[in-house]
Structures are given as structure tokens and as C-alpha cells.
Image (spheres, helix red, strand yellow):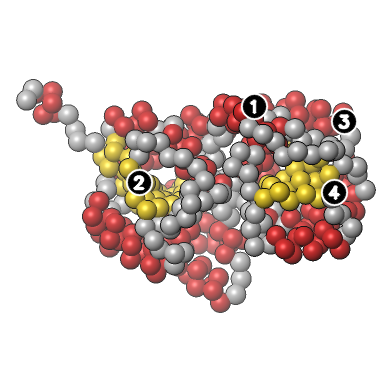
């Protein structure tokens, strides 16, 4: 064996953890980061731990070792199963996404002496909601997040909430916006089949859950009086309630819900504009994905991220009602009248053309290479300090 071979340091094992690869923004982001990380194999062994047995909507690179558990969405089972998995694998560092994975990761890692980096994808206070269950969840987050070696927040609003509501010190956090794989999106936009629509349409997408507030958007669409159709891509537990709302407002045939689309980009690329009606976001992935294919956008000024993308400002500096920001229109959250006004404003072809021109340029500020390098800088620093 040569002296060089003896001196060569062993590769560090980095284990990524997420609930599953079912359809969702965090799942898409972790796969995007992994695909971009192949050059990190020089110094690191990269593996992925999935907590739940759910069908994968996104592909993982073949060179990533994958282990799938069967935690069945249970936090207690997740903590126990992650502890057992970490005890077997003995990684040098773990990197987890989503709240349940983060809590399980920190608890298991603390018991085994394995440092954890956690990535908070949502505005935690808004995501946890209220009630007895939410109070318990808040206590768990507060007790565990402060024990992570580093916390990556997807927007400054998420970091501020973790500091103010959960006691996480600012110096323990790094703000890294989600990566947008512009090249892959443009290829997919040209390669797939769009949802067939027989009239111009506005589009939105996301899981059909209360927090996404598609009911408010449907109400605003009815009040706006604009021509064309509204297309909602996604699926979830609110589907039947939204269908009843569409019928009650006399919008059958004008509001279309075709379900989840593994490749939504051909449909996005042919839309007139995109709308995000959410009550809260960690970081608005779908908004930037729509912008990357040249769509003008409307978004609620919710916590956290839309104001940072569209106006380069904290949300507190945006006024009420409708704001015509440099990169899109911002609307007060959960305000159907303001949203209706924004829909009417975006129906102006000249305004759409102006926002469409700047949209891809703004999306390019959130490219994959920037995010990947920032993530691995945090990982390397955490491994070195351990």
C-alpha cells in the first residue's frame, strides 16, 4: 500500500432522512439535492433513510443507498426506528427534512452521539396550528431543535419564527432557499403531455389540504368575474369539500381538478398565469417552478418566502390588500376580495407580459448549484466540528 493511500482520509458517511418520497415540495427538493451531489462522493458516502412505506413519486440517483422503514406516520415508531437504523449504520452525520423526521433524528442522534443537521421546510408556528396536539408538538420541537448541530431554514421568515417561537439561536441557523432545477424543468415542460384545456386558464398546484387554501381561491375566482378557467393540480383530503364548493358557486366546468401530476410543467407552461393562495409556506417551491417556465404569478403574502421571492422584502414590509411587487403580485392572506382584485389585474395582457419577462430571470437566482454548495458547506462544517 502506498503512502498516499495510507494518508487518504476515509470518506464520511452522510445519511439523509425524510418521511417518504410521496408527492410534495420537500421530497422533490431532497431528490434534486441528491442528484446534484454526485461530486461529493469523493469525500462522502451518501445514503437515504425513508421513514414510511409510501409509493415514491420522485427518483433517487442509483448511487445513493436507500433504506425504507415502516413507521406508518407515527412519531413514536419513527423515533424508535430511526434510533435502530442509526445504531446499525453509524453515520458521521445525519441531515433530515420535515418536522417528524427532524424530531426523530435529533432524539435518536442525541442518544447515540451522532450529530444532526435538520432542514426546516415550513413556517413552524403556522404549520403546527393550535389545540392540544399542536401544543405537544410545539414542546417537542422546542425541546429537540435546539439540540441539532445546525438548522437549515428555507427562508428568513422560517428562521425568524424558529428564533422567536422556539428559542433557536440565530448563529446555529443557515438560511438556504430551495433549489430550482431550471434545466430539468424546461426539459420536462417540453417532453410531457399537458392537461387538455379548451379555454385560457390560470393554474395553481399543491396538496389539497386546508393550509393551501384553495377554497379561498375558488371563492375569489367566482368574485373576480374574469374569463377563462381555473385549473387546480393536486390531490388530498379536501377534494370532496372543494368539489362541493365549486358546485355551490356555479363553477362546474370552469374550475377543473384533474388530480396529481408527476410532471406538471407542460401544463404550467401553457397557462396564462399562476396563483398561490396558501395560508403559510416554508418556501414557495411551486411559485418559483411556475416562474421558471415564464409564468407571471400571484401569491398570498403568507409566512414565509413569497415576499422574499417577489419583492426582496420581509413580509412585514408589504402593505395590506394588493401589492404590485417587482417580480409578481402579492395579496393579503385569506382575503378573497383582494385575491379577486389581483386576478382581474393579472387578466391585463400588458401586465402579464411584463411579469412573464422577468419571471425566469428571478427563478434563476434560486438555481441548484448554489443551494447544493450551501448545503454541503453546512454539512462539512458540522462534520468537522463533530
Q: Nearer the viewer, mark 1 or mark 3?
A: 1
Rounded to the nearest angstrom, the CA distance separating label 3 from label 4 is 20 Å
Tag 4 and tag 1, C-beta contact below 8 Å: no
Q: Residue at x 24, y 36 (%)?
A: 11
Residue bearing the label numbered 2: 66
The answer to whether the residue labelled 2 contacts the one labelled 3, judged by CB atoms less than 8 Å apart, is no
Whole-Å distance between the Cαs marked 1 and 3? 24 Å
Q: Secondary structure at mark 4?
A: loop
Are dots 3 and 4 in contact, CB under 8 Å? no
Q: Position of residue 292 (x, y in %)?
A: 65, 31
Q: Nearer the viewer, mark 3 or mark 4?
A: 4
Q: Residue furthest right?
A: 225
Specify which label sits upstream in the sequence, 4 or 1. 1
How far apart marks 2 and 3 lie (CA) works out to: 48 Å
Precedes in sequence: disc 2 or disc 1: 2
Mark 3 = which residue?
349
- Vertical comparison of 57 with 291: above or below: below
Q: Calculate the distance from the C-alpha at mark 4 to the C-alpha at mark 1.
A: 26 Å
Q: Residues within 10 Å of mark 1 (few under 14, many from 20)?
A: few
Name the foreground residue: 192 vs 305: 192
Give the residue number, with chain letter if any, for mark 4.
Answer: 254
In the rendered view, tell whether residue 83 sits above or below residue 264: below
| Residue 357 visible from this viewpoint | yes
Tell me the element at label 1.
helix
Closer to the camera, 72 or 157?
72
Contact between labelled residues 3 and 1, with CB atoms less than 8 Å apart: no
Name the residue tied to disc 1: 190
Q: Earlier in the sequence, mark 1 or mark 3?
A: 1
Amino acid at each position: 500500500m502506498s503512502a498516499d493511500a495510507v494518508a487518504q482520509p476515509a470518506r464520511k458517511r452522510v445519511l439523509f432522512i425524510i418521511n417518504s418520497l410521496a408527492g410534495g415540495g420537500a421530497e422533490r427538493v431532497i431528490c434534486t439535492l441528491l442528484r446534484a451531489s454526485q461530486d461529493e462522493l469523493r469525500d462522502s458516502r451518501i445514503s437515504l433513510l425513508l421513514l414510511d412505506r409510501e409509493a415514491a413519486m420522485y427518483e433517487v440517483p442509483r448511487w445513493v443507498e436507500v433504506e425504507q422503514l415502516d413507521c406508518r406516520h407515527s412519531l413514536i415508531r419513527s423515533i424508535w426506528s430511526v434510533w435502530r437504523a442509526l445504531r446499525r449504520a453509524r453515520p458521521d452525520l445525519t441531515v433530515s427534512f420535515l418536522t417528524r423526521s427532524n424530531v426523530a433524528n435529533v432524539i435518536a442522534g442525541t442518544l447515540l452521539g451522532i450529530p444532526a443537521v435538520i432542514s426546516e421546510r415550513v413556517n413552524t408556528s403556522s404549520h403546527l396550528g393550535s389545540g392540544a396536539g399542536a401544543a405537544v408538538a410545539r414542546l417537542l420541537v422546542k425541546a429537540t431543535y435546539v439540540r441539532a448541530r445546525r438548522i437549515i431554514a428555507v427562508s428568513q421568515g422560517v428562521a425568524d419564527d424558529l428564533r422567536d417561537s422556539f428559542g433557536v439561536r440565530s448563529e446555529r441557523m443557515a438560511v438556504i432557499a430551495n433549489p430550482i432545477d431550471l434545466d430539468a424543468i424546461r426539459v420536462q415542460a417540453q417532453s410531457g403531455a399537458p392537461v387538455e384545456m379548451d379555454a385560457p386558464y390560470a393554474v395553481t398546484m399543491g396538496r389539497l389540504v386546508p393550509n393551501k387554501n384553495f377554497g379561498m381561491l375558488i371563492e375569489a375566482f367566482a368574485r373576480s368575474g374574469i374569463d377563462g378557467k381555473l385549473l387546480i393540480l393536486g390531490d388530498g383530503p379536501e377534494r370532496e369539500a372543494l368539489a362541493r364548493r365549486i358546485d355551490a358557486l356555479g363553477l362546474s366546468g370552469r374550475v377543473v381538478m384533474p388530480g396529481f401530476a408527476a410532471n406538471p410543467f407542460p401544463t404550467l407552461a401553457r397557462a396564462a398565469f399562476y396563483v398561490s393562495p396558501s395560508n403559510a409556506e416554508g418556501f414557495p417551491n411551486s411559485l418559483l417552478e411556475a416562474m421558471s417556465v415564464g409564468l407571471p404569478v400571484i401569491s398570498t403574502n403568507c409566512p414565509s418566502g413569497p415576499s422574499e421571492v417577489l419583492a426582496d422584502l420581509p413580509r412585514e414590509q408589504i402593505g395590506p390588500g394588493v401589492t404590485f411587487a417587482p417580480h409578481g403580485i402579492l395579496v393579503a392572506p385569506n382575503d378573497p376580495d383582494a385575491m379577486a382584485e389581483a386576478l382581474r389585474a393579472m387578466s391585463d395582457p400588458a401586465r402579464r407580459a411584463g411579469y412573464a419577462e422577468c419571471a425566469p430571470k428571478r427563478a434563476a437566482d434560486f438555481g441548484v448549484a448554489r443551494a447544493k454548495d450551501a448545503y454541503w458547506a453546512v454539512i462539512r462544517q458540522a462534520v468537522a466540528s463533530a
